[in-house]
Amino acid sequence: MQTFSIQLSLPSHYLSSDFFAFHLRDQQNVAEIVDSNTLHKGLMWQQQAAKINLRIDAQYATLSLDIDSPAVIPQESELYSLAKHLLGLNQPVEEFEAQYITDSVIGQLIEQQKGLRIYQSADAFEALVWAIIGQQISVHAAIAIRRRFIQAVGIQHTSGIWCFLDIQQVGQVSDDVLRQTGFSMSKIIALRALCEAIENQQIDLSQQVNHENASLITEQLLKIRGIGPWAVSYALLRGFNYLDGSLHGDVAVRRNLQTLLAGQEQPSAKETEKWLAQYSPWRALVAAHLWRSQSAAGY
């Protein structure tokens, strides 16, 4: 096993407790383990089992990557990119805060949650798989399915941690195994269609998403059978650092918006969509502030 390490500085007000809470959603610690101030996360790196160790000390983060294969040597730039991605450091949240911290409606919320950003999945494929699993079911149920999915399809790193799988591993597993993990037939179809679209280069998950190409990528993802608008917005948010998806259909967003506005009734999805529109190009970040306002840090 080989280990490669880098260190980078963190911005002021970085919410490290929120970062770790995001990775503590599965209390059984199958593919992510939080040990004090360190995240251990299993993943496939160039089709080899690997483990991320990401430690946060004050205003610094240190990432090391343990790869089982001695033949795989990552570039230092790849490790910096991975660390910045996972930590949400590619998001210009300071610009958002400067613009809206005096806003009469959301300013106080931003002040209370300064530094909030969207912590990312290891890559866009992981975010999309999570979004497919999570469509139209509770978070608790989605976490359980994801855990069984990883254990049934993935492999273990030599440390014992399970590695989130890659496209090749999904292609080798049967529909029966996927059903046993909790996938419905519609979600199996969506997962297969996603892998096929990636393999046929109908969609490129390595590209940066911005305001110029977000509509095109959204359109490409929505063409995949079984992937709906919520899944696309969530995946763009958790896998591509895209902060302008509209999560107006999210129940927690609507519930907490009702509290923020002191409304008598919970706003409809359409009403929430209209309200969020005024904060474009930051709609998803505003939604994240609403998530965070009355929920645990692992939003």
Image (tube, helix red, strand yellow):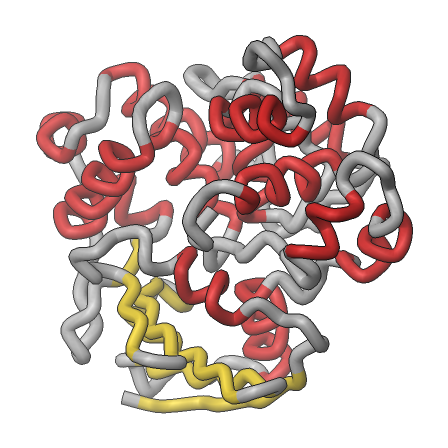
Towards the viewer: 244 or 164: 244
Indicate whether 264 appears above or below 42: above
Indicate whether 31 appears above or below 64: above
The residue lying at 52 percent from left, 71 percent from top is 16
Q: Is residue 65 left or right of residue 249?
A: left
Rendered location of residue 181, percent (x, y): 14, 35
The residue lying at 68 percent from left, 63 percent from top is 115
The image quadrant where one finds the N terminus is bottom left
Rendered location of residue 231, percent (x, y): 50, 28
Towards the viewer: 149 or 278: 278
Give the number of marks.
Answer: 0
Q: Is residue 81 left or right of residue 136?
A: right
Q: Is residue 90 left or right of residue 293?
A: right
Towards the viewer: 103 or 56: 103
Which image quarter: residue 69?
bottom left
Rendered location of residue 82, percent (x, y): 55, 69
Rendered location of residue 293, percent (x, y): 56, 44
Indicate whether 163 appears above or below 104: below
Indicate whether 139 appears above or below 115: above
Which image quarter: residue 27?
bottom left
Which image quarter: residue 47?
bottom left
The residue lying at 19 percent from left, 60 percent from top is 30
Q: Is residue 180 visible?
A: yes
Q: Is residue 204 visible?
A: no
